[in-house]
Image (cartoon, coloured by chain):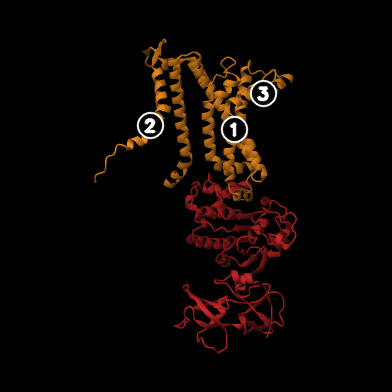
Amino acid sequence: MAKITLSNLAHSYLTDPQGPGDYALKRIDHTWEDGKAYALLGPSGCGKTTLLNIISGLLTPSEGRVLFGERDITRLSTEERNIAQVFQFPVVYDTMTLFDNLAFPLRNRGVAKARVRERVETVARMLDLTGSMKRKARGLTADAKQKISLGRGMVREDVAAILFDEPLTAIDPQLKWELRTQLKSLHRTFGHTMIYVTHDQTEALTFADEVAVMYEGEVVQIGAPEDLFERPRHTFVGYFIGSPGMNLLPARVAGSEAHLGGTRLALGRRYGQVSGGRIEIGIRPEFVALGNDGGNDGEGLPVTVTRIEDVGRHRIVRTDFQGREINAIVNEGQPLSEQMMSGQMTRVRFDPHSIKVYADGWLIEGKSV
Amino acid sequence: MDKPVNHRAWFMVMPVVILVAFSAVIPLMTVVNYSIQDTFGNNQFFWAGLEWFEQILSSERFHNALLRQFVFSFIILAIEVPLGILVALSMPKRGWTVSLCLVVMALPLLIPWNVVGTIWQIFGRVDIGLLGAALNELGIGYNYTQNWLDAWITVIVMDVWHWTSLVALLCYAGLVSIPEAHYHAARIDSASRWKVFRYIELPKMNRVLLIAILLRFMDSFMIYTEPFVVTGGGPGNSTTFFSIDLVKMAIGQFDLGPAAAFSLIYFLIILLLSWVFYTVMTNVGVELPRREKES
């Protein structure tokens, strides 16, 4: 086991990339610490699988290096890297028994028979597979097959990291939760470095110690789940994480005030004169309050309620502000006024300290007031 | 409830009944008819019972032809199946070369049997054939019209040339259906090339391979045109396979009774082998999961 360093890594599928648009993976410089669980989160086609394949050695990056510990493994083959990978769709050896499936990676490396048995039995016990070790893998359910794929990754003690490429895509929702829990406990037991690729924020946020959010071939933010929620460095992170995602509104920012379509909003920090292309302010729906008086006291943005969704623990109030959607989350305990219904005019107020300012998508750090 | 009785419905099945009767039932029954009678011409027939069957089954000529036939089919399978798999494995998986390979592979399959026979007949000729003349120039005394081994080699090489593509194309179809992730997983598991073949490729080719074996076996078992054109069954009787022998008996010697009995025995052998293959094929894929469910 070792830490994984990505040094100036970039990849393009073209032989002669011209602009940044030609890169499937834009420049990234990061270190993954030993024994932690990481998630690569992003929509389809954002380059997360490309990054994973570079780490696993199925792809050679066009620029930069990958290091396991101090060892440069950029040009080493998959076998020499000592990693394990679990794929999106379960890969099992149909004609082998479950035991032979799990033993396969060890036997190929010439591990002694007794040791193989011991390891396979440990892993099988962890995955609740002990009952059926003698049966053939053909005809198993998708989740059982994925468990075997997972087990084949776990069975080797010396792996530098275990990589997961959207491993729960083909699994039923009910079993998804169970397998994810099992994965977490496996991580705690064996302490392997794990890198988990997914487009499902719930999976990423519950599984990983640290999440790397990717957008159009770029890692836009790496951080703990709380960081991603509280301080999104990029509008994409704000939008992609949370449900619903961050409200983003074009605005003019000067000093500690934002001007939106004739309304003035106080900000929690001082920004000076913000210039640049596209200036937006972002606020999570959790920090949006509805002015239930609906009066004209001049505070907050005047909006029209378009829809109210009851999702159990809380309600999502969707409103319209000059053609832009602003969502607010109202907790269960907090009553909505009786007359609150779609089509009604009301006002929304933002918590000034939770408002973030973005220029061309990237967060601007203000000075504290 | 009273259903209206309408016998006109029978007319609907008449075309099929007539077609099957004329194409299969009546010819077969005619053969059965010949096989149990004897004639001295003038369209006069005498009852012969099972005499012809006994005669055929105990004749050395029949035994030899049967043996030749099985040896031939066995050699064909032993060469074409491994060779077909090998060719399929070395075919490219993507790019423009795929279409090129497929077209080149399909070419021999499109050539009619008697043309293939003619091509090889000329190709192997000692006087003007490229192969025959070249071999003799090199000092190898090759002559398929005189040496039985040369005749066998020629017929086998011809069949391999003509039909290995079929096995290869079927196997290729099985191979391309394997997801890339399986190969990646095998690399991560450090599986050797042999193990990749044994545990990933072969299981996926299982079904198509069985179809290929069945097709090649049945087809080689009924081979007639190509060896007939090349060697005419010779030298001597060395390449007289089942169907060639049958035609010799029926048309050459005009022994209608024995030839009819021969035909029926031939037919029954093929029926039996088809049944065996069918049983094996339907059980190989299906039986396994069923057995597992019970346990």
Measured from the top left, where is residue A273 in percent x and y? 72, 82
In the displayed structure image, the side of residue A332 where residue A151 appears, left or right:
right
Q: Earlier in the sequence, mark 2 or mark 3?
A: 2
| CA–CA distance in space, label 2 to label 1 | 33 Å
The chain letter under disc 3 is B
Label 2 amino acid?
Val
Crowd around label 1: few <14 · some 14–19 · many ≥20 (10 Å): few
Reply above or below: A100 against A280.
above
Residue A214 falls left or right of residue A140: right
Disc 1: which residue = B110
Taking the view exactly as shown, the residue that stands out farthest to the left is B1
Answer yes or no: is residue B126 visible: yes
- Name chain B's colour: orange
Q: CA distance from mark 3 to mark 1?
A: 19 Å
Pinpoint residue B58: horizontal percent, then vertical percent. 45, 15
Asked if residue B200 lies left or right of residue B40, the reply is: right
The answer to whether B246 is drawn above or below residue A215 in the figure is above
| Disc number lying in front (2 or 1) | 2
- Seen from the viewer's position, the closer of residues A57 and B146 is B146
| Kind of element beneath mark 3 | helix
Q: CA distance from mark 2 to mark 3?
A: 47 Å
Provide the chain ID for the residue under circle 1.
B
Q: Residue B151: which disc?
A: none
Q: Chain of mark 2?
A: B
Which residue is more in the foreground, A146 or A266?
A: A266
Q: Nearer the viewer, residue B147 or A309?
A: A309
Which residue, given by chain and number where applicable, does mark 3 sit on? B123
**The color chain A is rendered in:** red
Q: Closer to the camera: disc 2 or disc 3?
A: 2
> Which disc is residue B17 wearing?
2
